Structure formats: structure tokens, C-alpha cells
Amino acid sequence: MAKKGELSKTARASLAQRDDRNHLTERVCAKCGERILLKELLPVKVANKGMVYYHKAHYQV
Ligand SMILES: [Zn+2]
């Protein structure tokens, strides 16, 4: 019984981790203006402006 509980706790933890990566953040992409998923979030520090955020795919160096 204890072992079964342990297993389901682990399964829940890995599910939570997956949900975390798919979590929609409050950050808005400076290029397309849409909110960014945590796994796609790319913070960029800009002089005099602070942090701006991009989708990883939308950031051009
Ligand atoms: Zn974007």
C-alpha cells in the first residue's frame, strides 16, 4: 500500500512538471504581442528599458 502511494506521488510530480512547462505566463512577446508559454519564454535585458520577453522562435539577434 505504501509503495503504491509512493508511485502515484511520483506520477503526480512528473505530471505537475509537464504542466509547468506548458504554463502560460503573463509575459507578452515583444514581437508578436501574444502571451508566452513558460517553455518558450526568452527574457532579454535591454538597456534603459529593463526586461523584455520573446518567444524563443521570435527573437532575432
Ligand atoms: Zn512571439
Image (spheres, rainbow, N blue to C red):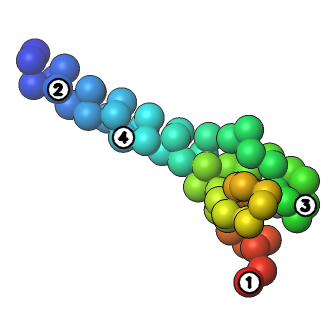
Residue on which disc 2 sits: 6
Residue shown at 86% from the left, 50% from the top: 34
Ligand 1, by image quadrant, is: bottom right
Q: Secondary structure at mark 2?
A: helix
Asked if residue 56 can be seen in this view, the reply is: yes
Sequence-first tag of 2 and 3? 2
Residue on which disc 4 sits: 14
> CA–CA distance between discs 4 and 2?
13 Å
Nearest to the observer: residue 60 or residue 14 = 60
Sequence-first tag of 2 and 1? 2
Q: Picture coordinates of residue 57 (x, y %)?
A: 73, 72
Would you call the spot at circle 4 few (<14 residues within 10 Å), some (14-19), or many (20 or more)?
Answer: few
Q: Which of the numbered marks, if any, corresponds to residue 46?
A: none
Q: Picture coordinates of residue 23 (x, y %)?
A: 62, 40
Left or right of 7 in this view: 55: right
Based on the displayed image, in which of its 4 quarters is residue 45 positioned?
bottom right
Residue at the right extreme, as displayed: 32
Ligand 1 within 8 Å of disc 2? The answer is: no
Q: Secondary structure at mark 1?
A: loop
Residue shown at 74% from the left, 84% from the top: 61
Residue on which disc 1 sits: 61
Nearest to the observer: residue 23 or residue 48 = 48
Nearer the camera: disc 2 or disc 1? 1
Nearest to the observer: residue 2 or residue 43 = 43
Would you call the spot at circle 1 few (<14 residues within 10 Å), some (14-19), or many (20 or more)?
Answer: few
Ligand 1 within 8 Å of disc 3? The answer is: yes
Residue on which disc 3 sits: 32
Residues at circles 2 and 1 in contact by the CB criterion of under 8 Å: no
Residue type beneath disc 2? Glu
Residue at the top extreme, as displayed: 1
